[in-house]
Amino acid sequence: MSTLPPCPNCHSEYTYEDGAQLVCPECAHEWSATDNAEATGEGDKVIKDSVGNVLQDGDTITVIKDLKVKGSSLVVKVGTKVKGIRLVDGDHDIDCKIDGIGAMKLKSEFVRKV
């Protein structure tokens, strides 16, 4: 059985290697074997909240768990609404400003989309 990925154009399963390229015999689409992750996943990481809703830049979220702010005695309380989030790469998925606390980085697993 072939371990080659299907064609990103027509989704044909009959792709084959031609040197460093992958080729689809049905639609004649050629793509690089090293670009395969970007071709099939379209290069975008989908970030979801704690219940599975897809998050986007500018969304409003609610914190679902008390979160201690590292390096201070402040706590972000359950139910705190945060408007205008910005999605980023890294171990913390969300950049935002929280009233009374300031700029924060949050993990998407501790928030819910409103």
Image (spheres, rainbow, N blue to C red):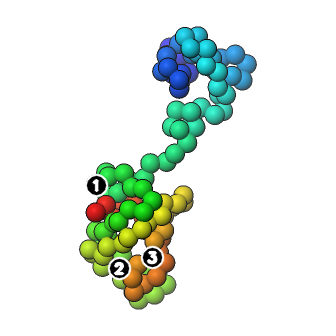
Spatial CA span between label 3 and label 1? 22 Å
Spatial CA span between label 2 and label 1? 20 Å
Give the mark toward the camera: 3 or 1: 3
Q: Are marks 2 and 1 in contact (CB under 8 Å)?
A: no
From this view, report whether residue 89 is shown above or below residue 74.
above
Q: Residue at position x 45%, y 71% from top?
A: 96
- The image quadrant that residue 80 belongs to is bottom left
Q: Are marks 3 and 2 in contact (CB under 8 Å)?
A: no
Give the labeled residue for mark 2: 76
The amino acid type, in three-letter code, at marker 3 is Lys
Spatial CA span between label 3 and label 2? 12 Å
Comes first in the chain, label 3 or label 2: 2
The amino acid type, in three-letter code, at marker 2 is Val
Is residue 94 in view from this perspective?
Answer: no
Q: In the rendered view, does 7 fall on the left or right side of 114? A: right
Mark 1: secondary structure:
loop
Mark 3: secondary structure:
strand
